[in-house]
Image (cartoon, helix red, strand yellow):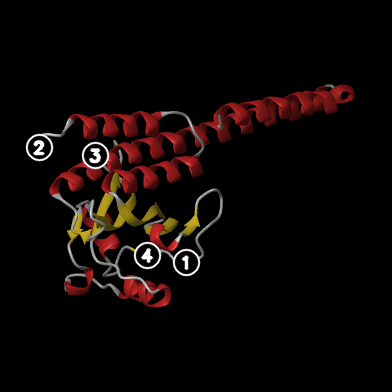
């Protein structure tokens, strides 16, 4: 597969974007926005794997000006169980990408959810590209679902093999970035726990300056959080 120069530059920019320091919610936003932009998708959903179920993190339909989730605003929908017959569950179980040209003519998966969304929102889901987010340990940590690719004339079309390959690359990079962010968060929790233990120990030995010790510790935590979110 040979990419033109502009597309190559766009992919490199996405790679740089997803690897720069940012908060976890912001990283989720960047992943789905970058994938939708490069494929010119009208809609998209990002799921994260938690306890063997796929949880909705962000849902977007641009033509309806619809956005749910992200920025600490949870999506109030039940998770997708991995034993379900949905395309997302299949992709997570098998670690394979599915490229569906026409949802309503597909007999392989259960499309009850998208059809219900279409009916409630006067929408029509047609093409879908569903990609597993596989990290450096070959673990699926989420699923990226892109909806309705739009061509330059404004028509809904199927996703191309090139877009499929590009989104698989973005998915792998996103998975590694998310895993690294989780590791950083776990390390931060460990450091916080150690700092609190030291603070409690100092207070026990020298109670006269207990408040000062706690204030210094809190200032350090706040400053670390500020740097982490820049």
SS for dot 2: loop
Mark 1 and mark 4 in contact (Cβ < 8 Å)? Answer: no
Please give the name of the residue rendered at 31% of the width and 70% of the height, measured from the top-left corner: 124
SS for dot 4: strand
Tell me the distance, in whole angstroms, between the alpha carbons under discs 2 and 4: 34 Å
- Give the residue pinned by disc 1: 77
- Give the residue pinned by disc 4: 80
Tell me the distance, in whole angstroms, between the alpha carbons under discs 1 and 3: 28 Å
- Considering depth in this image, is 2 or 77 the residue closer to the camera? 2
Mark 4 and mark 2 in contact (Cβ < 8 Å)? Answer: no
Residue 13 x, y percent position in the rendering = 33, 30
Mark 3 and mark 4 in contact (Cβ < 8 Å)? Answer: no
Q: Give the class, few, some or many, for how many residues have Cα within 10 Å of label 1's Cα (few <14, many ≥20).
A: few
Q: Quadrant of the C terminus?
A: top right
- Give the residue pinned by disc 2: 1
- Considering depth in this image, is 11 or 96 the residue closer to the camera? 11
Mark 1 or 2: in front is 2
Dot placed on the residue nearer the N-terminal end, 4 or 3: 4
Tell me the distance, in whole angstroms, between the alpha carbons under discs 1 and 2: 39 Å
Q: Give the class, few, some or many, for how many residues have Cα within 10 Å of label 3's Cα (few <14, many ≥20).
A: some
Q: Quadrant of the N terminus?
A: top left
């Amino acid at each position: 597969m040979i990419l033109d120069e502009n597309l190559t530059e766009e992919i490199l920019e996405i790679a740089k974007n997803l690897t720069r320091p940012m908060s976890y919610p912001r990283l989720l936003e960047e992943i789905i926005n970058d994938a939708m932009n490069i494929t010119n998708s009208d809609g998209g959903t990002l799921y994260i794997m938690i306890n063997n179920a796929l949880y909705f993190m962000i849902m977007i339909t641009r033509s309806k000006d619809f956005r749910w989730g992200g920025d600490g605003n949870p999506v109030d929908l039940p998770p997708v169980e991995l034993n379900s017959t949905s395309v997302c569950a299949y992709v997570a179980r098998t670690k394979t990408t599915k490229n569906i040209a026409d949802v309503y003519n597909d007999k392989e998966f259960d499309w009850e959810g998208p059809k219900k969304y279409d009916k409630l929102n006067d929408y029509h889901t047609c093409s879908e590209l569903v990609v597993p987010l596989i990290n450096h340990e070959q673990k699926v940590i989420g699923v990226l679902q892109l909806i309705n690719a739009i061509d330059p004339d404004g028509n809904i079309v199927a996703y191309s093999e090139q877009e499929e390959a590009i989104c698989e690359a973005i998915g792998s990079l996103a998975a590694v970035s998310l895993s690294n962010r989780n590791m950083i968060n776990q390390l931060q929790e460990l450091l916080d726990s150690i700092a609190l233990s030291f603070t409690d120990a100092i207070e026990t030995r020298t109670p006269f300056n207990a408040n000062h010790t706690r204030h210094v510790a809190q200032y350090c935590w706040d400053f670390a959080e500020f740097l982490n979110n820049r």
